Image: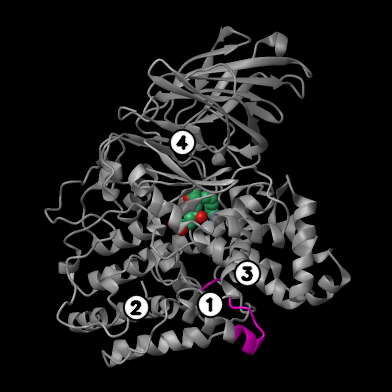
Amino acid sequence: MSGKPIKDVSSLSNSYQMLEDGVDQVCLDTRDLNISKTKIDGKDQKFLLDAPNEAFGSCLKIRVPQELQQNGKRFKAEVHYSTSQSSTACQASNSHVSSALRCKKKPYLFTQCQAIHARSLLPCQDCPSAKCTWSGAQPQVLLMSFFSPVIRFSAVMSAPSWATVLMSAILENKSEQAQKRVFTWRQSVPTCSYLIAIAVGDLESREISSRCRVWSEPSMVDKVANEFAETEKFLTTAESITCEYQWGRYDLLCLPPSFPYGGMENPCLTFVTPTLLAGDRSLADVVAHEIAHRHLRWTGNLVTNATWEHFWLNEGWTVWLERRIMMRVRGSKAGPKGQARELKYKNVLREGQEIPSTLTSSLILDGSTWLETSSTSKVLQSYMTREVTTETEIGQSRFTKLVPDLQGIDPDDAFSSVPYEKGFNLLYSVQQKVGDEEFEKFVKDYINTWKSKLITSLQFKDFVMNYSAHFKKKLQDFDWDRWFYAEGMPADKPKFDTTLSKLANDFAHRWTTAGAGADLIRLKSVGQYMLDQILENSEKQKMPIAVLQDMDAVYEISITNNAEVRFRWCTLCLRSGADFIVQNAVSMGRMKFTRPLYRELQRRKNVNFYHPICRKMVAQDLKVKQNNKQGWSWLGVSAVTISAYLVWAVWRIRSRKCPIPFVH
Ligand SMILES: CC/C=C\C/C=C\C[C@@H](O)/C=C/C=C/C=C\[C@@H](O)CCCC(=O)O
Ligand SMILES: [Zn+2]
């Protein structure tokens, strides 16, 4: 807690059983760990740490004595180690990380292990195919003991008496000892290393339901409880679509602003970014997404992609279920901002067709426009519509394959919205071909068949094609190879209702060309999509600052609490050179926003605020060399007071009344 991620030496103790003769070493993934000692059955043993590979770290090899090298032999291997400041899994700080939330008082530590960062927290088999359970044992700083083949490890953590330790597990015991608190955790569902998660800080909680509790720093906790008050409703809805929730508790931790993702489906304890705190629950679809991961036994946490190449099976399915949940929860009733929903569901009724998702974020609304127009997919989107031109783009285009080749590649480098949106498109396309009712039944059968198993894309294809004669017939021309292995979107994509997207395009066109007149837009969803379209148009033709001022007068965009809208607005303003907008910047580290804004900003300041994963990826985006320990080597170049992301609030037109709110 003093700047180093995990300060003291931890010991990790694994039990192994030989499954064949002649295995002479135990190999574990590590990255930037300081290994001091290894033991087999309590006796010191030699170990070897491979030279580090940039993407994958170093393999730790512990020598197994000759007498234990036969099939059936059991032994215990121990690793004594400490993490280092370069740990990409951890972000620890004394106070400044939380500053954007004005909770500067206490240190905070949190981890993010997906995809392959667990190895920088503990030596482990850091791949989705290795799962483990864990339970409490002797109190130690961090004791983890693994058993093979279904590995078990125990997690006992101590912290100062003001601090709370949380973990992606069920709390077994909490005790107070001389000026410290000791927490013991149990996870009885076999879980992959990428789902191990820890957070330590000055944390407070509020109960939402008998199985849901939200956590955050004290000054935020009521806001967080209000924003995520629908969590239990999402959970029960997911249960009605699929099956009973398996993980016991569903708690939610709202992290400091530097958390690099929207949400992370850590078992029993979802991690979420504070950028979801819109104040009106309008960004709760991310919570539905994380529930979809964990609630269902199959979309990620119980049925797991066998390797990261099949990541779309985690995320495409999760997006499908997230949208299903939101349809059920928000669809039938008009909410406080009911106009958007009403219009959407009128369209559904009129056309007898489902509009995917709530349209609250950048979505595929239109058969001819897919993917979000912002965020990480900017480059990817361009492949759908035009020829690839630059070398970087050629490098990236391979990741628009649903099943990319990740040989030798750090999964972080391949990450984009492709597995999410293209994956969803594939599933939705199958649904449209076989019919809604048949698909719903298929979903339940799929879950029951594959729960607690690993799955590859080809296994999925076989399962679908052999599911029933009806499926076989309806999908006889389905071009699986094109979906899996070709770049971009296949021509045979699902059809979506385009009413709203046409409306948004029309408004965007009017703002772009005439510079006014879009004042009929009352709907947040359309407004957001409209901004996407304007952004796209503004690549060719900058929006004049006067028009932006007009837009802000009409919609009051610059005071919205909706981070999705704010992000688009900031990008647009920056692109138009309206730098005066960004003087009082508030920093947020969610990569979805940070990376594109950094690309837009091309300015360099406040780097150490950001999470190590975010720093790495942004450094790549900007093609600069990163110095892990001190932030970026180019830090300090800029004299301008601009942090990276959400850049907020100085400028607002006060002289004009805003007749129609953008809907905040
Ligand atoms: C082809 C796919 C390659 C790799 C997949 C595995 C992991 C990628 C790695 O970079 C980690 C991703 C973590 C994601 C966590 C949560 C997301 O759902 C958040 C999405 C973006 C956001 O909303 O901020
Ligand atoms: Zn997900």
Q: Which residue is mark 3?
A: 328
On whether ligand 1 comes within 8 Å of the CB at mark 2, the answer is no
Q: How far is the residue under mark 2 from the one under mark 3?
A: 25 Å
Q: How far is the residue under mark 4 from the one under mark 2?
A: 49 Å
- The span shown in magenta is 347-358
Please tell me whether mark 4 sits on a helix, a strand or a loop.
loop
Q: Amino acid at mark 1?
A: Ala
Q: Amino acid at mark 4?
A: Asn
Q: How far is the residue under mark 2 from the one under mark 1?
A: 18 Å
- Residue 558 in picture, x, y percent from top left: 26, 71
Q: Which residue is mark 1?
A: 334
**Sequence-wise, which precedes: disc 3 or disc 4?**
4
Q: How far is the residue under mark 4 from the one under mark 1?
A: 54 Å
- Residue 450 in picture, x, y percent from top left: 76, 51
Q: Which residue is mark 2?
A: 662
Residue at position x 19%, y 57% in the image: 642
Say which of 547 and 102 sits in front. 102
Q: Amino acid at mark 3?
A: Arg
- Is 523 situated above or below 303? below
**Sequence-wise, which precedes: disc 4 or disc 2?**
4
Q: Residues within 10 Å of mark 4 (few under 14, many from 20)?
A: few
Query: Does residue 62 appear in the picture of this structure?
Result: yes
Q: Residues within 10 Å of mark 1 (few under 14, many from 20)?
A: some
Please tell me whether mark 1 sits on a helix, a strand or a loop.
loop
Q: Which residue is mark 4?
A: 53
- Residue 147 in picture, x, y percent from top left: 67, 24
Which marked residue is nearer to the observer: mark 4 or mark 2?
2
Q: How far is the residue under mark 3 from the one under mark 4?
A: 47 Å
Q: Residues within 10 Å of mark 2 (few under 14, many from 20)?
A: many
